[in-house]
Image (cartoon, coloured by chain):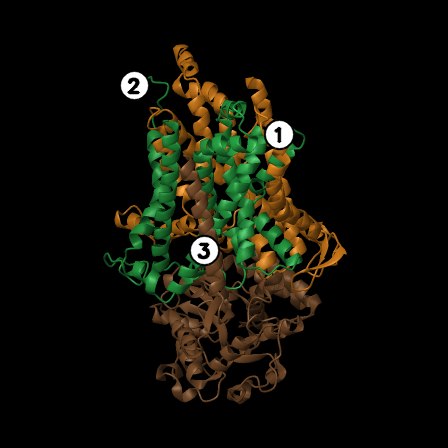
Chain colours: A brown, B green, C orange
Amino acid sequence: MKPTLNSILKSGTAALALTLGANAAVADEQVVVYHWFEYMPQELVDKFTEETGIEVVIDTFDSNESLLASLKAGALGTYDVAVPGDYMVAIMNSEGMLDTLEEGELTNRANISEEWANPSFDPGRQHSIPYQWGSTSFAVNRDAYSGDINTTDILFNPPTELQGRINMFDSQGEVMALASLHLGIPQCSTDRAELSALNDLLQEAKQHWISFNSDTAKEVLVSGDAAAGMIYDGFNAKAREEGANTEYAFPTQGYVAWMDNVVLLEDAPNRENGIRFMDFLLEPENAAMLTNWTAYASGVEGVTPLLDEALRTLPEANPPAEAGAAVFIEVCDQETQAVYDTIWTNLKN
Amino acid sequence: MASSKNDVRHYTGFFPITVLCLVILYAPLLVVTIYSLNDSNSITNWEGISFRWYVDVFTGPESDKFKTAAWNSFTIALMASVMATTIATLAATAMVRGGSFRGRGLSLGLISLPLMVPEIVTAVATLIFFSMIDFTRGYLTILVAHTAFCIPFAYLPISARMQGIDDNFEQAAMDLYASKRQAFTKILLPLMAPGIVSGLLLAFIVSLDDFIITNFVKGAGVETLPTAIFGSVKQGIKPNIMAISTMLLGFSIVLVTISFLISKSDNTK
Amino acid sequence: MAAGASSGGSAKSDTYAEARNWLLLPSWIVIGIFVLIPVILMLIYSFLTKEFRGGVIWEFSLAAYDQFFFDRGLFGDSPPVIEWTYINIFWRSIWQAGLATLLSLAIGFPTAYFIATRPEKIRPAWVFLITIPYWVNLLIRTVSMKFLLRDQGPLNDFLLSIGVISDPIHIVNTNFAVQLGLFYSYLPFMVLPIYASVERYNFALSEAAADLYATKWVTLRRVLLPAVKPGVIAGCILVFVPSLGSFLAPDLLGGARNFMIGSLIEEQFKGNAGNWPFGAAASMILLSMVLVILMIFARQQAKANKGDA
């Protein structure tokens, strides 16, 4: 018995020492990216590593809000760059989470296309570069429903065929924005009657919704678990590729526009590598590779000639003439946000 | 023997329910094992047997992620269980061989605390704690949290075993002028070996199994297998996940079988 | 899970009495610092002021508990009425955990009984067979369950192919799926304690009852059941308590309509809500419920032990 125990203890200690040693060795050149799920092709990651020798470590989140929550809860200082949406860039900046890109640090800064060089959420692009942009509305399985889908009624006052078969995003910003468009009220309204109407609308509509999921939004449409659901434009293109007979809607009431951006985080452990990563993504060749994969749109100059022919004719990227306006999500002040939170809680429970 | 209609031990219907119970327990695992061998890209259609998803786990686009996660899981489980078992062995010696003393109940309560507090509560509390002392979350935070909650799992089999060992052996050794330390290391510890190994395996599996607490205390890019699998599964169950699951499943079963055989060989002694 | 509290009841030896403080020190330090202090810290946080977008401000506030129990309207200035939202979530969790416990009991009791009445030699093999799945990663088991039950999953395929049903049954995203998931997660906790008490049960009592012309089911209810009651209660608690705060089964199998306490708490720290004091308060309420249940249980066990002696 005794030798057994001794050898167990010994091999245990040996393994301990081995692990600690191995762990120290792992931490050479790397860049730690806090990214959305399924948002960067592996080939592009490999290409970066090949060109720079920097290993890419990717951790994923599933909503802008959970990105913020995680950084707030002590994850700041462990990531180099993150990929927040437009309004979240503004919020993170106001929270002091973003580092500033100094003059000349970004070699490819000039590649940022004109229309995205000075956005309202980051004037002068001091902290961020464009990643991809696109729209959010919803898609309907054409096998389940053949009527007109270009109306937000599909989500908030659905036809019988779709009732109880709708998946919503688990993301306050997008749901509230679409609901506001449906009611024709401004986002972040401070008007009590309008806010109450918003609450009533969601309370009434939720009986028709089967789930709140952002990360499985595509999967539930492909598998048929949901017949309609909120989705990003590029995700619907992928859903169709995977065999789903879904059509992306452009509601006449309007829909949500977004731009995801790569930001440099405060206290980045590998700040230099983070900047190289951003520069890499600003190369037209790489931006095109990304866009061809995501089926969204790039904010980088000179990408268009490098894009797949199919992308130009993608139904998701070509809204019909009667489509409503695409609007960005707005950042509410603390008071309105408190009401939004209450409405959201009422909705989710 | 159970065939007699008047046998008070036999109840008609209990056997079918037992079978049903086993079916419910094993059906999901069997199904996943079978579908992990599916030669299809889709999880729905069956297209013949192949090991391509097992190959994919080791060479596919996500292989690096899962290899790192497996390495993290394994090293954390190993270190956490070794530390937890050491701490639990010492604690059990005090509790079982330390006479009655004030604070005994309190100590027992403290040791079983991680069992009594719901996991989600421990997870949140640990997150708050690390964030308040401004401790960067990562590998180390997972390791520390795992060590703490593994202690009671190691403690249970160890203290149970120690209670079953008569302290006459140690007394006899000390009558022969062995010191207490010698009695402990040369007599008690060897006798305790099966209990310690059970405790170690239990703690190891519990650490390997943990998702909730790890999910809260993990830091940038440091994934364990469960959190990596959870991240993947969120976007839908994929065939490579089923292959990983099957391998992990097999690994756990081997460990439990070892533990079972150890305890069995011990009982027949 | 409270089993740890019952071991070491009889301290026979005091061989290492003078070293015991040193022997206990490591466990005190590790669990004290990394479990006890965090839980105390969480209690404190539940009485702090919420910071906009996550985190806390170090100012005393009852807002978290107020939000839990009182509804002050959409704008926070209506006269308070009882807030049912969170009470309902807790109630739903209790209900779900309760049904899962009943399900476990309905299947676990006959199974435990069956195993305990097998010949002594093969009992450990049976116990082993029942406990194996428990050692497989909980996440993997839950995912497997989801895979099996999907609308296009193997179960529906099978039932469709043998013609029992003509349309797939919806199981995923229902309450039943959550109960099934919880049942699957914690079943061995039900079987093992019941098995232990039935194994100790003196079947001569049942035989005596049978001799007095009691039917078998009467014997079961009037003679066996009272004797193995402690095991049954222990099993129920061991299933109920972890089910109450579980996160994976409701999250993966339940969908949006089946929000339970675990998801509510998680959302305060990881999701949209970002309200730490509220998450801490909800955790404290859950913890108090669990501790009360365990205390009642411990008292009952103590009483039962006294009765035996």
Rendering coords of residue B146 (x, y %) = 53, 49
Residue C17 badge = 1
Label 2's element?
loop
Closest to the camera, between mark 3 and mark 2, is 3
Q: On the image, numbered disc 2 is attached to which residue?
A: B4
Q: Residues within 10 Å of mark 1 (few under 14, many from 20)?
A: some
Rendering coords of residue C174 (x, y %) = 46, 50
In this rendering, position of residue C54 left or right of residue C191: right
The residue nearer to you, when weighing B95 against A58, is B95
Badge 3 sits on which subunit? Answer: A
The residue nearer to you, when weighing C29 against A207, is C29
Label 1's element?
helix
Mark 3: amino acid: Leu
Distance CA(mark 3)–CA(mark 1):
37 Å
- Figure check: C3 above or below A264: above
Q: On the image, numbered disc 3 is attached to which residue?
A: A18
Closest to the camera, between mark 2 and mark 1, is 1
The residue nearer to you, when weighing A292 against C91, is A292
Mark 1: amino acid: Ala
Q: Residue at x 48, y 67 (%)?
A: A58
Distance CA(mark 3)–CA(mark 2):
61 Å
